[in-house]
Amino acid sequence: HKYPVLNTPTEDVMNTFHAKTKPVVNVMNSVKDTTTSTIQHGKDAVREFILCVYFSIRLLLND
């Protein structure tokens, strides 16, 4: 504790609160990151799929 004078029950409660909520916040951040990257991969997959279809159609039309 930097400020021993402020070592009140309130501070203890706050420390306990932060200690308990930190894992929850970490999980939420992790879920957010996973969702963001999944959406990004999904966009890339859709873009690649559209390109594949586009080139397939062009090949069919050229034949």
Image (tube, helix red, strand yellow):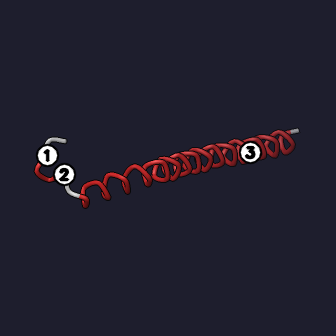
Q: Look at mark 3 in the image and give the residue it sits on.
A: 49
Mark seen at residue 58: none
Q: Is residue 24 left or right of residue 34?
A: left
Q: Is residue 62 left or right of residue 45?
A: right
User: Could you tell me which residue is drawn at 87 percent across and 42 percent down?
Assistant: 60
**Type of amino acid at the residue the image marks with label 3:** Phe
Q: Look at mark 1 in the image and give the residue it sits on.
A: 4
Q: Earlier in the sequence, mark 3 or mark 2?
A: 2
Total marks in image:
3
* Residue 52: image location, x then y, percent: 76, 41
Q: Is residue 29 left or right of residue 10?
A: right
Q: Quadrant of the N terminus?
A: top left
**Type of amino acid at the residue the image marks with label 2:** Asn
Work out whether residue 11 or residue 29 is closer to the camera in this orientation and state it.
11
Helix, strand or loop at label 2? It is loop
Structural distance between the alpha carbons of marks 3 and 2: 60 Å
